[in-house]
Amino acid sequence: MATIMQDAHWAARAACGKGGKDGKSEFAPDALFVEGAAQREARSVCQSCPVRLECLADALDNRMDFGVWGGMTERERRALLRRRPEVRSWRHELVGSGEMVGAP
């Protein structure tokens, strides 16, 4: 089961960031801010990311409007936020379930 780490430096360990899965990343973070079919490739980077839940929770809590975050596109995140308007802390919601709530 995946859990969300509670530190503020999760992005340094992201597969798309400098930390990456193996301490180095060949993936440019700007590639996560694409449209259409290119989002599939961007989402694939998230599949094995060690901080996927932290990323998604941060994007949902902060209402990130653009890009792929935690494996979800902006359209998917908007739909999830509309379906679950009562959620105040996605970090707590995702920790409780350990699952990618609403993810395809």
Image (cartoon, rainbow, N blue to C red):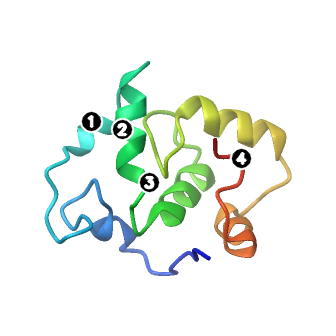
How far apart are the alpha carbons under marks 2 and 1?
Answer: 6 Å
N-term mark: 2 or 3: 2
Residue 69 x/y as whole percent: 47, 47
N-term mark: 3 or 1: 1
Dot 1 corresponds to which residue? Answer: 31
Report the amino acid beneath label 2: Ala
Q: Is residue 34 above or below residue 47?
A: above
Label 2, secondary structure: give it. Answer: helix
- Discs 2, 3 touching: Cβ within 8 Å: no
Identify the image quadrant of the N terminus: bottom right
Report the amino acid beneath label 4: Gly
Query: Could you classify mark 4 by the number of other residues whose Cα lies within 10 Å: few (under 14), some (14-19), or many (20 or more)?
Result: few
N-term mark: 2 or 1: 1
Q: Nearer the viewer, residue 69 or 9?
A: 69
Dot 3 corresponds to which residue? Answer: 47
**Pair 3/1: label in front:** 3
Name the residue located 67 percent from the left edge and 71 percent from the top edge. Answer: 98
Dot 4 corresponds to which residue? Answer: 102
Query: Could you classify mark 1 by the number of other residues whose Cα lies within 10 Å: few (under 14), some (14-19), or many (20 or more)?
Result: some
- Discs 2, 1 touching: Cβ within 8 Å: yes
N-term mark: 3 or 4: 3
Report the amino acid beneath label 3: Gln
Label 1, secondary structure: give it. Answer: helix
Query: Could you classify mark 3 by the number of other residues whose Cα lies within 10 Å: few (under 14), some (14-19), or many (20 or more)?
Result: few
Residue 84 x/y as whole percent: 82, 47
Dot 2 corresponds to which residue? Answer: 42
Q: Nearer the viewer, residue 44 or 87?
A: 44
Is residue 42 shown left or right of residue 68?
left
**Pair 2/3: label in front:** 3
**Pair 3/4: label in front:** 3
Q: Give the farthest residue toward the top.
A: 36
How far apart are the alpha carbons under marks 3 and 4?
Answer: 15 Å
